[in-house]
Amino acid sequence: MFKFLIMIMMLVNTAFASDIKIQVKGMVCDFCASTMETAFKNNANVKSVDIDLKTKKINLDLKQSKTLSDQEIKNIVKNQGLLVLKIER
Amino acid sequence: MLRTLLLFTFLLIQTHAIGRPISYSGGTTVMQNNGPIKHNIHIHYTPHYTYSIGYIWEHYRNDDIDLNGIQLNYLIHRWHYLHAQGNLYFKTAFGDAEQSSQHDIYALVNLAGDYETQSIFTSYDAKLYRSNGHIMDQFQQSARLGVAPYIGDYGDLHTWLMLELSHQPNYSGDTFILTPLVRLFKGTKLVEIGYSSDHRLLFNWVLRF
C-alpha cells in the first residue's frame, strides 16, 4: 500500500513537472553557459538548470506549481547579453 | 608602416583578447597576463552585461614602467548567431604612470573585437597610451587566431591552440612578437601557457565569480 502511494506521488509529480527547453543564440563557451546557468538558478521559480553547449539549449525544470512566461525567459537571457531563438514547452 | 597596417587589417578581418572584459551582471573577474613585454592584473566588476569597471596594474619589464589605473570596459556591439558570437569593445583607463620615481598621469584608449565559434577563435586589440610627460606614449596592437582540436560540452575541459601576433612600435625590444600558446578553459576558469619568439614565457589566467 505504501509503495503504491509512493508510485502515485511520483507519477503526479512527473505530470506536473515543468520542463522548458530554450535555444539561445551566441552561447559559444563555458563563460556564456555559466552566465546562463547562474541567471536561471537565481530565479525563485527554477528548480534545476541543465545546459547543452553543443546544441545551445538550456533545459529548465521548474518548481512545482511555478511558471515562467516566455517574456520572463527572454528578459533573463537578454539581461545577460544573449538572445533567445526558440522556447519549447 | 603601410605593410604593418595591411597585415593587421587582414588579421582584423579574420579575427579577441584573453578573456572577455565584461562578465555577467553582478559578476567579478580577476585576470592576470604575463606576456612577452609586460605583466598586468585587471580586477573588474560588471553591473550590467554592457560594461564593467575595475582596477588595472601593468608593469613593463624592459622600460621598468608601472601603471596603476581605473579601467572602464564597454560593449559597443554584440553579434549573435546560433553557433557564433562577435563582440566589439571600447576600453579606457587613466591613472598613474611611474618610471624611475618620475610620475605622469596616463590615459588609455583601447578598441578590441572578437569572433568565435566553438572551434574557431579570432581577435584584434589596439591600444593607444598617452601621458602628460613622456613615460607612457605608446601604441600596441595584437591579433589572435585559434582552433579547438575537439568540441567539448559545458563543464568539460576545453582546449585551444592559438597563435598571437603582437606589434608594439614604441617598445625597446622586438617590435613584432609571435607567441604560440595553449588555452585551457573549464567552467569559469581559464589558463593560457605559451612561449614567444623573443624567448619569453606567456602565462595568463582568468577567474570569474
Image (spheres, coloured by chain):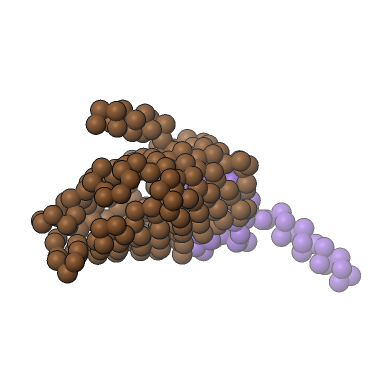
Chain colours: A purple, B brown
Residue A21: x and y in percent read 60, 46
Residue depicted at 66% across the width and 56% down the height:
A17
Q: Is residue A40 visible?
A: no
Decide which of B22, A64 is in the foreground and name it: B22
Q: Residue at x 36, y 62 (%)?
A: B41
Q: Which residue is drawn at 63% across and 42% down?
A: B150
Single out the residue that lies furthest toward the right.
A1
x, y (%) of residue A44?
51, 64
Residue B38 appears left or right of B130: right
Q: On the rendered structure, is A78 left or right of B141?
A: right
To which quarter of the image does residue B187 belong?
A: bottom right
For the view shown, which residue lies furthest in the left direction?
A: B132
Q: Which quarter of the rendering shows the N terminus of chain A?
A: bottom right
Image x and y of residue B184, in percent: 55, 53
Quadrant in which the C terminus of chain A appears: top right
Residue at 31%, 43% (x, y): give it. Answer: B175
Count of marks overlaid on the render: 0
Where residue A38 sits in the image (x, y, percent)? Answer: 50, 59
The answer to which of B71 and A35 lies nearer the viewer is B71
Is residue B34 shown to the viewer in this render? Answer: yes
- Where is B119 relative to B65, above or below? above
Q: Tell me if B181 is positioned left or right of B166 in this view.
A: right
Give the left or right position of residue B55, taking residue B30 as reference: left
* Near-viewer residue (B150 or B134): B134
Residue at far bottom of view: A2
Q: Residue B139 is drawn in which quadrant?
A: top left
